Image (cartoon, rainbow, N blue to C red):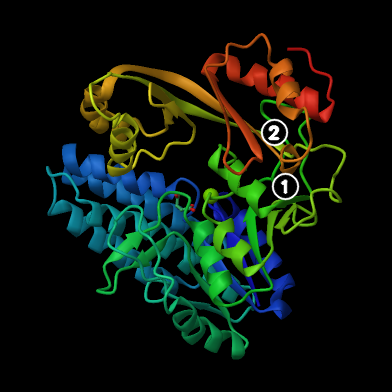
Amino acid sequence: MIVMKFGGTSVGDAGAISRVCEIVGGRRLLSPVVVVSALAGVTDGLLRLETITQNGTREDLRVAIEHLLNRHRSIAHALDLPPAFLISIEADGTALLRDLESRLGTMLNEEARDSLASRGELWSSRLVAAALARAGLPADWVDVRPVLRTDERFGRATPDLVGLSDRGRLTFGRLLEAGRIPVTQGYIGSTVNDRTTTLGRGGSDFTAALLGTALDAQRVEIWTDVDGIMTADPRIVPEARTLAAVSYEEAGELATFGAKVLHPATQLPLAQAGIPIQILNSFAPDRNGTTIADIDPTSEEADTPIRSISLKKGITLVTVRAVRRPGPNTFLHALFETCERHELGLDVLTCSEAGASLTVDDPARLEKALPELRRLGELRVEPGRAIIAVVGTGLRDTPGIAGRTFAAIADTNVEVISQGASAINVTFVVREEYASNAVRRLHDEFFGTVVCA
Ligand code: ASP
Ligand code: MG
């Protein structure tokens, strides 16, 4: 069997969903399980209802929910889907309005927020299942939540891997054996008590990976709106090209450092199971895309030791200079403890007993941690930074890459430099306004394009 995951833009409108039907139909003999994201923009739209609940009126809520439902209705209309299938979406929209009305003027708790956000995938999967059925395919809508059990960390729940395979086979295996095509939700799960959770933004890829592992898939296909993983963001480097193959480790590093194509946790379970991932473009399904697998870095695309240069903006650089106190130095311990407790998720970190520089991409979490960080020493907080990561397995055993990297951006003011523990990336922090130029120069250095900065 294979898992086929379609992202938000790939199911964003009637035309996109028609293409999905063709693509799935073409792979019918491979026994696909279809995993979908919410329609593009719907998760954001749902999460905006939280603010409306807090500050708006009943009428504001009604209008906003109608707007979201209309997206689904108009697609159903355009694809000429039987009206019956909309009933469940309509009923859920009404239930949602009632629920949020009863919370007007209050802040949603994390559980209510997850229940809200989960609607996007619940609705889109109904739509896609109905569209596939309309196209003559034996599609069945499946609620993923009883299969994808998680802990109770609403908003970023951790899946329970114990028994996942059994639950998956019970639900999906049975349908596949009967020649059916299950259509289910990415991003959402539930606790053992059936309370709906989410895996964190962009989590549908992770769901696809988990189901692929649980069902021992031949491969997991991630269908999106670009051709695959590229040597750089083409909006910054027009000459950037799509990579035919990258290793699991490289894909993980690139996702962590800003490549939006894949959720950073996706490759972990699949790497362990040795299941390849294919990134494909649902708007150009004949292109080869990028394969993520156990590849030999010396044989594939060996012309360059570097695979890609990624860029992550919206970073805050925090520098702490330790206050010297008599007795044993507990600075690092206290620093790590604070970062861990506030779940700061540091991407780049350089430290010694004298102080540390670290990057944080979540200003709200940082804000909460600041009073404690201040107690550790003299603090500098600099927003508006970007992380650039040069990633490639070749970094490990090709001498001189770090030197070439720094020579290429010699005139850029680099604030922090770090070589990742995996030894397949060199990362550095620069001011956001210098970032694009630095990426272009690095691309030029490693991929030989001629650029005028
Ligand atoms: N719909 C969710 C989001 O927008 C999950 C996903 O698309 O992967 O984050
Ligand atoms: Mg995504």
Residue 216 image offset from top left, x and y in percent: 61, 76
Q: 339 or 352: nearer the eye?
A: 352
Residue 122 in sight in this render? yes
CA distance for labels 1 and 2: 13 Å
Q: Is residue 364 left or right of residue 427?
A: left
Q: Percent from the top left, x then y, of residue 156?
A: 36, 53
Residue for badge 2: 232
Which residue is the extreme one toward the front?
A: 327
Compared to 437, does 289 lie above or below? below
Q: Which of the pair 26/247 is nearer the observer?
A: 247
Q: Please, is residue 76 above or below residue 433 in the view?
A: below
| The N terminus, quarter of image | bottom right
Query: Dot 1: what SS?
Result: loop
**Residue occupying image coordinates x 84% and y 19%:** 450
**1 vs 2, front mark:** 2
Q: Position of residue 63 (x, y in %)?
A: 29, 46
Residue receiving disc 1? 227
- The answer to which of marks 1 and 2 sits earlier in the sequence is 1
Question: Quadrant where the C terminus lies?
Answer: top right
SS label for mark 2: loop
